[in-house]
Image: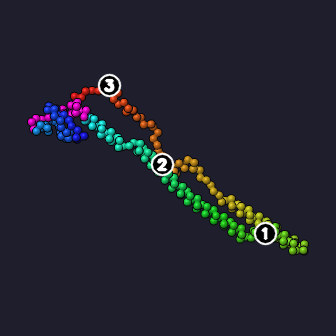
Amino acid sequence: MEEITLRLENCEKWTKYKNLMNKTGDFICPECVRTHTVNVEQTLKMSINQEKIKRKKIEIAFESLSRENLHLKIDEHFENLKNKVDLHVEELIKKINDIRIDMVDKIYQKKNEFIEDINSVGFQHLNKENFSEEMENINDVLEKLVIEDNYLKNIDKKKCQIKKILDQLDKNKFERNKISNEIIQIVGILKLTEEKIQLNSTIGASEDFYEDFQPWL
C-alpha cells in the first residue's frame, strides 16, 4: 500500500502513498520542494486516487484470502476432531480391555477354588465303578447291605453337597450395566453446528455496478 502512487491536488504531480500517511490537512508538497502546500484529505478524495487505493486494497485482500486456504483449514479442523474421537475411544477400549482381563483372571481363580473344594471332599471316589468293584469282592449278604447303606448315605451327602455347590455356583454371575444412554456420555459428546451458513454468491460482483455507483468527490 505504501508504494502506490497518487496524484496530488493542485500541482497534479504524483507521489508515493507513504508520503501522505499519518498526515492531515495542508502540508508542504513533497514533490515540488516547498513551493506550495497540498491538502491530504482532498488528495485522497480524488477519484483517480480512490480507484488506485481501492484497487490495492482488493489486491491485498485477495492475497490474504489466498493464504487462508479455507479448504485446507476445514480439512485439518475436522481431521483433528476425528483424531480426538479416535484417540479417546482407543483409551476407553484399553481401559475396558484391562477391566476384562481382571474379570477373566477372577473368573478362573474362582473356578479353581470350586474344583479344589470338590476334590477335597473326595467326589471322584464315590462312583458306580468303585461301588461295583467293591461289591463283586463280597459274598456275605449282610456285609453287602452294610456297604450299600453306607453308599446310600454318602450318595445323599454328595447330593446335598452338589446342591450347595450349584447354589453357590449360581451366585457367580456377570450382570450387564444398563448404559445404553450413558455410553454416549462415557465416550463423549460431539458438538457440531446445526444451522447452515448463509453465504451470498460473490460471482459477478460487478453486475450491480450501475445501481450502486456513486461518483467519488
Q: Disc 1 marks which residue?
A: 126
Q: Are marks 1 and 3 in contact (CB under 8 Å)?
A: no
Q: Secondary structure at mark 2?
A: helix
Q: Is residue 69 above or below residue 167?
A: above
Q: CA distance from mark 2 to mark 3?
A: 47 Å
- In the image, is 107 to the left or to the right of 146? left
Instruction: Say which residue appears at 81% left-offset and 68% top-offset.
Output: 129
Q: Disc 3 marks which residue?
A: 211
Q: Disc 2 marks which residue?
A: 82
**Nearer to me, 108 or 83:** 83
Q: Earlier in the sequence, mark 1 or mark 2?
A: 2
Q: Residue at the top extreme?
A: 211
Dot 3 amino acid type: Glu
Dot 1 amino acid type: Leu
Query: Is residue 37 found inside the magenta-colored segment of the image?
Result: yes
**Nearer to me, 24 or 44:** 44
Q: Earlier in the sequence, mark 2 or mark 3?
A: 2
